[in-house]
Image (tube, rainbow, N blue to C red):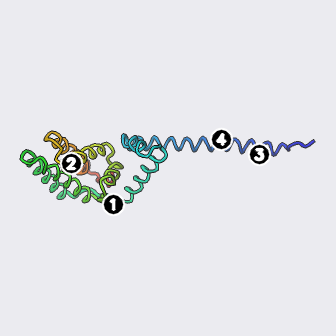
Amino acid sequence: MNTIPAQWIILAVVIAIAAVALAAWVSSQRKRRSQRLQQRFGPEYDRAVTEFGSRAKAEAALKAREERVEGLDIVALAPADAARFTQAWAALQGRFVDNPKGAVVQADQLVRELMLKRGYPMGDFERRAADISVDHPALVETYRAAQTIALRNERGEADTEALRKAVVHYRALFDELLEVRKADEELVSGKQIPAHS
């Protein structure tokens, strides 16, 4: 009669336990990564899952965004640049009453100029939105809403109320990118302004 030596049985049990432990660890790491991405990207996470059709594909895309943006040289504005952008925005808002369609076009251009000055590359809109979503996830949907209205404006399909909303949406992103509040807080506390929010 052939019997399996006790050593082989013990080895098989140890391997089985190790495999179960490894599977549990991998599952735990995936769950942590998912939770981290959900917390970082907020509604953008759900949008990516819908767009890509699976959590794994969405998470890979979001991780790629993070890595791409980490490789960028996103910088804080010099006070003179921040003042210039603030003045440009004030002038734009002053022109809204007389030319709301033009103000939306100018708001889009000013946000793009600010993004470029901060170090974001100027690819197509979806690429810009993806880059913004890494450091400013709460505002990426606002940016998309403003862009949708701007496209309707180009086709002559946006009424004055929609144009007003677009300017408000652009302003929210503009303020966040300008980092006026953060710069003021940093000056009061004497701390350095971080490159990434």
Q: Are marks 4 and 2 in contact (CB under 8 Å)?
A: no
Note whether residue 180 is visible: no
- Helix, strand or loop at label 2? It is helix
Look at label 3 and name its amino acid: Leu
| Left or right of 104 on screen, residue 126 | right
Look at label 4 and name its amino acid: Val
Task: Give the Cα distance between marks 4 and 3.
Answer: 14 Å
Q: Position of residue 53 (x, y in %)?
A: 45, 43
- Classify residue 139 by image quadrant: top left
Q: Residue furthest right?
A: 1
Question: Is 61 drawn above or below residue 42 in the view shown?
Answer: below
Q: Position of residue 172 (x, y in %)?
A: 22, 44
- What is the crowding at mark 3: few (fewer than 14 residues within 10 Å), some, or many (at least 20)? few
Disc nearer the start of the sequence (1/4): 4
- Helix, strand or loop at label 3? It is helix
Q: Which residue is mark 4?
A: 20
Q: Residue at x 90, y 43 (%)?
A: 2
Disc nearer the start of the sequence (4/2): 4
Q: Which residue is mark 2?
A: 150
- Classify residue 116 by image quadrant: bottom left
Task: Give the Cα distance between marks 1 and 2.
Answer: 28 Å
Q: Are marks 1 and 2 in contact (CB under 8 Å)?
A: no
Q: Which residue is mark 3?
A: 11
Q: Are marks 1 and 4 in contact (CB under 8 Å)?
A: no
